[in-house]
Image (cartoon, rainbow, N blue to C red):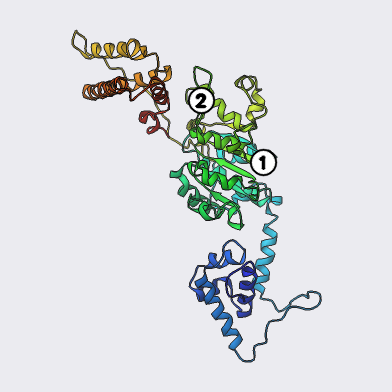
């Protein structure tokens, strides 16, 4: 055996184990590691540490020191049938070969080898709509709680069984990385490696045997260091790219018809194969399959919704007008959305309790000094004074109005504090302009950023 683990390490470990007459489990016990670790070593999924390799060298040395044990020699002549092999090993080999063709006998084979019992709406999405497409470009937009992670894992597991996928890249928000990795491992026995910014510092995490199944957060991948690794020519194309929480990719078009893209959306454009991108965002490849997951595909604005569809078919849906004319039957091949009311058990029983939504009215106190007067004057201020600023865009004005009205509904104190902070902010801006520390152009930039600020009332109360 070599003194350090190299490219021949998997073969050498397997040969040593066989010479010792050990199973992978038994060898793992001798080394003090887990069985999956030995399995990954022998299948080139990972490389032993130098400490583990030294222990393997010790075991090899023990073999050489045993008297009467013949040295291992290379086989000569054609291979012969070994009738002395362990029956358990032969049985496992035959069963593995049989299971590799299981999808031919059972179209829903992945459900048999996964730790799940798919619900009807999950089976319909995966087996009726997604698997039948030779090139999947799909927007899965079921309500929150529908199990979009499970549907994605079921699709991946089925495609692996059919040998139609090898490399998969999953791009969720940072807070969901652990959930994705755990569910794919526990429910589908799919091991995915998490890539961080540090992984791209000295090596390319998208190359090598551990790069076939990768999870990386959308903001990490959109960073220049990690994305530059993905752009390297030696990187093999990924067969499937999955974006979770796709509505957060964020693209919009302002009143001046200028399209404002975030780095997240530029990343999605690059992976979707959109042409004519800035050179810094171009990839030498694009995935064959693209899957977008979101519970809120339409958030009240038409252009961001179109932006998601554009990622699915960049050449066909190159303009909003082309999207408006896209035939409904064609859309059905790329989109599915079910609400909680539509989801049922196999028995037909509703999956979720019936939701009852009522609008409860509340009469504001009337009078010269009253809740009604405060509400009316606040709204009037927003419409005629706040919105009068020539530099403030309309969307920012609408956002400010809704925020102040919500705070008014919360308490008069909350509204008072909002106005006090606004006065302080305006006084500071006036002071900066008077002192020459803020130009009109800089003020325009500050006002435009208002439209991009997060409204916690919307973002923190969503699904």
Give the x, y percent position of residue 155. 60, 45
Please give the label number shown on residue 86: none
Residue 422 placement, left or right of 78: left
Of the image marks 1 and 2, the number of the one nearer the N terminus: 2
Q: Which residue is mark 1?
A: 288
Residue 416 picture quarter: top left
Position of 383 relative to 101 (above/below): above
Report the residue that reaches farthest toward the top: 368
Residue pictured at 39% horizontal, 30% vertical: 454
Q: Can residue 294 be seen in this snapshot?
A: no
Total residue callouts: 2
Q: Can residue 244 be seen in this snapshot?
A: yes
Q: Give whichever of 461, 358 is nearer the camera.
A: 461
Give the x, y percent position of residue 280. 58, 38
Please give the label number shown on residue 252: 2
Give the x, y percent position of residue 340. 48, 33
Position of 52 relative to 331 (above/below): below
Residue pictured at 65% horizontal, 32% vertical: 275
Residue pictured at 21% horizontal, 10% vertical: 366
Q: Give whichever of 399, 146 is nearer the camera.
A: 399
């Amino acid at each position: 055996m070599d003194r350090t683990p190299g490219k021949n390490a998997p073969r050498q470990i397997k040969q040593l184990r066989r010479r010792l007459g050990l199973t992978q489990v038994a060898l793992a016990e001798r080394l003090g590691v887990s069985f999956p670790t030995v399995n990954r070593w022998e299948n080139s999924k990972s490389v032993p540490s130098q400490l583990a390799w030294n222990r393997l060298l010790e075991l090899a040395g023990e073999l050489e020191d045993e008297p009467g044990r013949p040295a291992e020699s290379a086989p000569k002549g054609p291979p012969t049938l070994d009738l002395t092999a362990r029956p358990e090993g032969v049985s496992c080999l035959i069963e593995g070969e049989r299971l590799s063709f299981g999808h031919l006998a059972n179209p829903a084979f992945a459900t048999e080898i996964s730790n799940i019992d798919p619900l009807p709406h999950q089976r319909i999405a995966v087996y009726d709509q997604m698997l039948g497409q030779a090139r999947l470009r799909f927007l899965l937009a079921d309500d929150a709680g529908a199990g979009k992670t499970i549907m994605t894992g079921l699709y991946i597991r089925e495609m692996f069984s059919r040998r139609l996928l090898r490399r998969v890249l999953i791009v969720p928000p940072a807070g969901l990385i652990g959930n994705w990795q755990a569910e794919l491992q526990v429910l589908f026995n799919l091991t995915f490696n998490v890539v961080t910014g540090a992984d791209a510092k000295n090596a390319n995490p998208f190359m090598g045997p551990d790069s076939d199944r990768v999870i990386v957060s959308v903001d990490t991948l959109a960073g220049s260091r990690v994305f530059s690794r993905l752009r390297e020519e030696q990187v093999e194309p990924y067969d499937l790219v999955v974006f979770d929480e796709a509505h957060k990719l964020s693209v919009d078009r302002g009143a001046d018809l200028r399209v404002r893209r975030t780095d997240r959306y530029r990343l999605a454009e690059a992976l979707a194969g959109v042409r004519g991108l800035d050179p810094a965002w171009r990839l030498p490849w694009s995935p064959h399959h693209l899957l977008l997951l979101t519970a809120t595909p339409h958030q009240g604005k038409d252009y961001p919704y179109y932006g998601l569809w554009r990622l699915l078919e960049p050449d066909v849906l190159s303009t909003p007008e082309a999207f408006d004319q896209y035939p409904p039957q064609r859309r059905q091949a790329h989109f599915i959305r079910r609400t909680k009311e539509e989801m049922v058990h196999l028995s037909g029983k509703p999956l979720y309790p019936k939701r009852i939504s009522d609008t409860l009215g509340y009469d504001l106190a009337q009078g010269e000094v009253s809740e009604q007067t405060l509400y009316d004057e606040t709204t009037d201020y927003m419409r005629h004074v706040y919105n009068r600023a020539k530099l403030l865009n309309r969307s920012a004005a609408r956002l400010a109005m809704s925020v102040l009205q919500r705070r008014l509904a919360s308490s008069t104190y909350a509204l008072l504090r909002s106005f006090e902070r606004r006065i302080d902010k305006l006084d500071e801006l006036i002071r900066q302009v008077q002192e020459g520390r803020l130009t009109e152009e800089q003020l325009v930039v500050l006002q435009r950023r208002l439209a991009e600020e997060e409204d916690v009332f919307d973002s923190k109360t969503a699904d």
